Every structure is written in structure tokens, then in C-alpha cells.
């Protein structure tokens, strides 16, 4: 049995129970030769003859999927499946699985790290101190501020729990809101308009779909409080980045923290030039704990499907 393993953090040199389990199950493992997601042209030849794939952020579009003759399962190393053409996979008889919730704590940690970095200007302070300057910029506190969480899934809930530790007022907007959880954790359900207009910090935790692309548009951002912070650790494409840069330059937006981008890696000079922007390289889920869990669950999902067993994290059936 031949398996392609594409996540850059899932390497053949890893000492990992999940990798050992995969080696015992499949005799032929093929790994991503790069340190970043594969391009379409790289992915197609690597999938040749594969029975299954542990998939990172690579583009499993229709062309890639239709080229993968004999592929039976795409097991996502992560929760999002926006990089997989689910309709094409279903047509080709390929089952798609994911690992929902296993990286929620890691992503929530980074979301708060970005908030604190922006509120206290940590990257700027660090850079100036290293340069021998002693510029003690005035920051702002998170304590008792209002945070708006757009998307109250596993990560959104983890962010809300952290916000409670800062005595923050928590607003949430989600079309499928877990009302019992919201009531138990003193989270106020609101409309998108109310969330944007009343929040000091807005943190995004939505999947990227046709109806969420650029959900944070120019008009929506213009409705934000002057000086508010915008955080995205979910998916690039949720924010209209060009409009966000203009509002950061004008001072309407107080700061923006991004771990995900419309184009990855990003190459927008406007983003790179702003001191009120903190950027990280799509790394929210990359903690030792989260990567171990994602590896374990994604491998077990693949083994379950290829062994004909019931997989609890099936997104679509082949």
C-alpha cells in the first residue's frame, strides 16, 4: 500500500507513534520534499499509484483529484477542508476526513498572542530595544475590553475561555451558535453589525466558503470602532486585505494580526511596511501538542477508511 504524506511538519525523520503506526500499516510512504505546501504540478506526480494521502494545505482541486487514479482517501491533517474539492472527491469515490478540534487550543493561544502583541506593541518594542533605542510606547490593556468572536466553533470557544481570564465582555456571531455553551460562559449572541461596531478586538474563526470570502469587507470594517484590532487565525480570504491595509494606514483600524493570507506566502509590501500589523506564517496549529494530535487522528482516519472501518471524522464519503 502506498501513502503520500504532504504536511511540512510531518517528516520522515520524526519520532512519532503516529508515523510508526503508519509505517506498520503501509509499506510505501512518500513524503513532501519541500518545507511548504506542494503546488498542483508537484502534487500530481507524487499521488501516482497512491491508495491514500495524509494531506496538508496543498491544493486538492479537481485536476489533482481526477489525476489520482486509485486514490481512496484524503485524510486532512487539520480541520479545514477548503483546499479539497469535495464534489470532485465524491465523484471519484474518494473519502475525505479531517481532524476537527484537535488544534483548537494551539490556535486560540496564537490568537491571544497576536492580540497581546498588537495591544502592547511587542514586536516594535523588541525591535527598537535591540537597536539600542529606549522608546517606551504606550500600549493598551485587554482587561475588561470587548472581544467579538466571529465563529463559535472549537477555536472560537477556546478563545472565549481565554477572554474570561482577562475579564473581557465576549460577543459572538455564528449562524449555528451553540446557545447552551454561550449561556454557560456568559457569551452574548449578536449580529455581525453589532459585533463589529461594539468590539475592541474582533477575532475570526470561520471556515472559508463562498459565503464567507471577504466577509470582512470594506463596509464591514468601516463599521468597526476606531482603533479596534482585527485578528485572523482562521483562513486567508475572510478579510479584504487591500481594504484592511487602507484602513490601517488611515488609523481607522488600530492594528491587525494575521496568521493566514489571501495569497500564501504573502508578498504585499503594504502589509510588510506597517508597524501596527503583526504577521506569522500560518503557524497557529504548529505546537508540539497539536501536531502530535493531528498526526495521530489523521493517521487513524486514513487507516480506518482503508481498512473498511467506520471513521468518526468523515467529511464526505467516496
Image: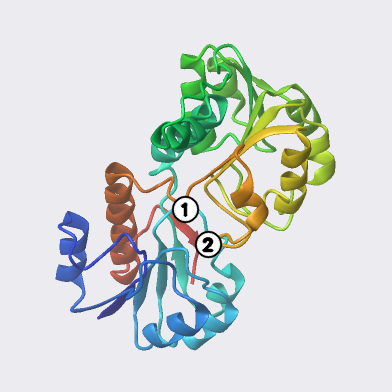
Please indicate, yes or no, whether residue 197 appears anywhere in the rendered image.
Answer: yes
**Residue 102 % position (x, y):** 38, 44
Q: Position of residue 174 (x, y in %)?
A: 67, 35
The structure's colour scheme is rainbow
- Asked if residue 236 lies left or right of residue 222, the reply is left
Question: Is any atom of residue 231 visible in this view?
Answer: no
Q: Is residue 132 left or right of residue 140?
A: left
Q: Earlier in the sequence, mark 1 or mark 2?
A: 2
Q: Classify mark 2: helix, strand or loop.
A: loop
Q: Is residue 158 above or below residue 165?
A: below
Q: Residue furthest front?
A: 132
The image quarter in which residue 290 lies:
top left
Q: Is residue 301 left or right of residue 123?
A: left
> Could you say where residue 67 lies in the image, as x and y percent from the top left?
50, 87
Q: Residues within 10 Å of mark 1 (few under 14, many from 20)?
A: few
Q: Cα distance, mark 1 to mark 2? A: 7 Å
Q: Nearer the viewer, residue 245 or 198?
A: 245
Horizontally, residue 145 falls left or right of residue 113, namely: right
Q: Write down the residue under mark 1.
A: 281
Q: Nearer the viewer, residue 209 or 169?
A: 169
Mark 1 secondary-structure assignment: loop
Instruction: Give the residue displayed 39% in from the left and 58% down from the top.
Output: 77
Decide: few, some or many residues near mark 2? Use Cα within 10 Å; few <14, some 14-19, many ≥20: few
Q: Which mark is residue 265?
A: 2
Amino acid at each position: 500500500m502506498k501513502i503520500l504524506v504532504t504536511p511540512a511538519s510531518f517528516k520522515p525523520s520524526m519520532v512519532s507513534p503516529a508515523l510508526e503506526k503508519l509505517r506498520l500499516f503501509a509499506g510505501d510512504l512518500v513524503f513532501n520534499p519541500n518545507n511548504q505546501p506542494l503546488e498542483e504540478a508537484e502534487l500530481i506526480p507524487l499521488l501516482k499509484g497512491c491508495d491514500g494521502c495524509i494531506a496538508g494545505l496543498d491544493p486538492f482541486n479537481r485536476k489533482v483529484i481526477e489525476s489520482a487514479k486509485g486514490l481512496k482517501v484524503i485524510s486532512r491533517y487539520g480541520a479545514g477542508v477548503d483546499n479539497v474539492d469535495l464534489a470532485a472527491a465524491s465523484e471519484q469515490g474518494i473519502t475525505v476526513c479531517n481532524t476537527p478540534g484537535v488544534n483548537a487550543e494551539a490556535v486560540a493561544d496564537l490568537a491571544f498572542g497576536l492580540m497581546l502583541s498588537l495591544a502592547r506593541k511587542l514586536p516594535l518594542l523588541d525591535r527598537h530595544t535591540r537597536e539600542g533605542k529606549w522608546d517606551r510606547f504606550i500600549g493598551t490593556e485587554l482587561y475588561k475590553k470587548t472581544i467579538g468572536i466571529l465563529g463559535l466553533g472549537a477555536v472560537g470557544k477556546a478563545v472565549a475561555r481565554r477572554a474570561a481570564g482577562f475579564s473581557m465582555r465576549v460577543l459572538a456571531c455564528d449562524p449555528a451558535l451553540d446557545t447552551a455553551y454561550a449561556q454557560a460562559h456568559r457569551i452574548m449572541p449578536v449580529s455581525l453589525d453589532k459585533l463589529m461596531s461594539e468590539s475592541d478586538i474582533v477575532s475570526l474563526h470561520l471556515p472559508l466558503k463562498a459565503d464567507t470570502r471577504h466577509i470582512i469587507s470594506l463596509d464591514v470594517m468601516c463599521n468597526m470602532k476606531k482603533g479596534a484590532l482585527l485578528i485572523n487565525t482562521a483562513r486567508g480570504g475572510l478579510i479584504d486585505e487591500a481594504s484592511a491595509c487602507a484602513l490601517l494606514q488611515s488609523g481607522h483600524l488600530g492594528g491587525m494580526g494575521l496568521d493566514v493570507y489571501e495569497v500564501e506566502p504573502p508578498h504585499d509590501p503594504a502589509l510588510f511596511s506597517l508597524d501596527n500589523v503583526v504577521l506569522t506564517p500560518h503557524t497557529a496549529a504548529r505546537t508540539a501538542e497539536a501536531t502530535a494530535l493531528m498526526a495521530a487522528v489523521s493517521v487513524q482516519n486514513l487507516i480506518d477508511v482503508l481498512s473498511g472501518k467506520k471513521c468518526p471524522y468523515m467529511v464526505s464519503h467516496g
